[in-house]
Image (cartoon, grey):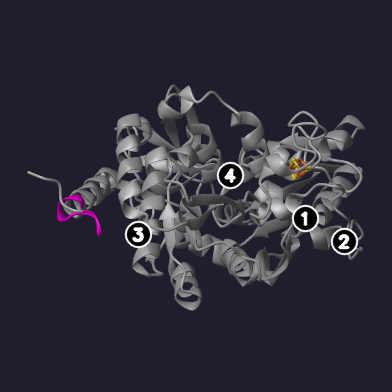
Amino acid sequence: MRYLDEYRDGQAAQRYAEALRAIVTRPWTLMEVCGGQTHAILRYGIDELLPPGLTLIHGPGCPVCVTPVAALDRAVALARRAGVVLASFGDMLRVPGSAADLLHARAAGADVRIVYSPLDAVALAEREPEREVVFFAVGFETTAPANAMAVRLASRKGLENFSLLAAQRRVPPALDAILASPDCRVQAFLAAGHVCAVMGIAEYVALAARRRVPVVVTGFEPLDLLQGVAMAARQLEEGRGEVEIPYSRAVRPGGNPAARAAMDEVFEPCDGEWRGLGVIPDGALRLRPRYAAFDAARRFPDEGGERPAPRDGDCLAGLVLQGRLRPPDCPAFGGRCTPEHPVGAPMVSAEGACAAYYRYRPRPAAAVAAVGAP
Amino acid sequence: MCLGIPGEIVAVREGGAPESPRLAVVRFGGAEREVCLDLVPEARVGDFVIVHVGVAISILAREEADAVFGYLEEIQALSELEAEAGAPGEPPEAP
Ligand code: SF4
């Protein structure tokens, strides 16, 4: 048991595909919320195992992709400031801002450092007390507890040179916004398993009841995804709209109490812009007043305050992130826009939908049968 | 940056400074990495955890590990039942 390979069994996947054909009598459209799921679906060809008429569209669940241009611009401005170390997860470095990305800023002399964990950024601040360390805190509810722990740790250690550029997003309000759109095609969600591992399902129960939509809390391996699809399809066929948790090995209905407590202690919900979806009420997290001393936006108020929202260039990420455009249908896809020279965020991130299509499609049909091959 | 990966706790480092995180060594396939256990205080050596940005966020429940196979059997049994009952409008197969 390694909680990995056993869920990549090609024979079981084929049996799931057969059972699905018996379940599905009508066309349905499901959205997988999380970019990690999008990647697994394309990598293992899960979409090609589904019965005709059962369509998966890719959701906005990639924190790198939905971080708005204004947040990128602020990070670039802070990185260029003398005495500042801008610490960031690696895949934020190549996400285009309105004029430059962090990689360009670094090439021009800015002190940008890649960290694997927010806690590493705290250690950096401790090691270099003469520098101001700003951690660029992107992420969903999965990441927010780790960001919260970093702030708490810095506070306990009495560090005065550590702050957070908070650009975190909350997922359920974005799902609500997608359903509210008049041309919404989504009939059920495969919800992001690790967001729910932290948060539990309360917000999704409310969403499912209010919108009469099936929400199936799904894992990230091929069999997990097939089970999620089967449960969502059965709900749709039977006219139900409930929350189910097939990813029960990692998700408890109440989530992770310690993680939620850390998050609640440090952050509070606020309105926030999602790239492609606009400003979403309660769609973001900011530092609570008692931790204001760790808020980079307060410590450096002159860097990128209220400016007109910069435009996204000619990237169609907005449509991709709402599930209204398949990445290969973007005119820039694979030509002007590649992972080496990304025009937009979804081509950069390891979880971006455009990058997933670029990496895994088209591929030989033989690979479809070999679900489970790495 | 957003992925959560399962790994096995192979050692727990007790006895750091009181304000420091509780750390463990977690094995992912061949690689080992230091991981913070503060959000899964009950985690022990031998447990599998989901690790995200250097922090364990969930202990995997052994008793739920096979749920995905159980559900497969359930829906297969269901589709066989339906096949036996005959799809609507289709005559049953001749004996
Ligand atoms: S292919 Fe490139 S330009 Fe087109 S939507 Fe994706 S990231 Fe944007």
**Amino acid type of disc 2?**
Ala
Please, what is the dominant secondary structure of the magenta stretch? loop
Earlier-in-chain disc, 3 versus 2: 3
Is residue B86 magenta-colored?
yes
Residue A130: horizontal and vertical position, in percent?
82, 42
Q: Quadrant of the N terminus of chain A?
A: top left
Q: Residue tagged by mark 1? A: A68
User: Which residue is rendered at x = 77% and y = 28% of the image?
Assistant: A340
Chain ID of residue with mark 1: A
Residue drawn at the location 52% of the way across and 50% of the way down: A56
Q: Which residues are magenta?
A: B83-90
Q: Within 10 Å of the Cα at label 1, are there few (<14), some (14-19), or many (20+) other Cα atoms?
A: many
Identify the chain of the residue marked 2, using the numbered disc in the image. A
The alpha-carbon separation of the residues under discs 3 and 2 comes to: 43 Å
Q: Return the disc, 1 or 2, that comes first in the chain's sequence.
A: 1
Q: At which x and y percent is residue B44?
A: 33, 42
Q: Secondary structure at mark 3?
A: helix
Q: Could you tell me how far apart the alpha carbons at marks 1 and 4 are, in whole angstroms?
A: 17 Å
Circle 2/circle 4 CB separation < 8 Å? no
Whether tag 1 and tag 2 are in contact, CB under 8 A, the answer is: yes
Separation of disc 2 and disc 4 at Cα? 26 Å
**In screen coordinates, is B60 left or right of A121?**
left
Residue B79 in view in this figure: yes
Please check whether the numbered discs 1 and 3 fall on a single chain.
Answer: yes
- Residue A10 - label: none
- Residue position for label 2: A309
Residue behind mark 3 = A234
Observer-side mark, 4 or 3, equals 3
In the rendered image, residues at marks 2 and 4 fall on the same chain: no
Q: What type is the residue that disc 4 sits on?
A: Cys
In this rendering, which labeled residue sits more in front, label 3 or label 2? 3
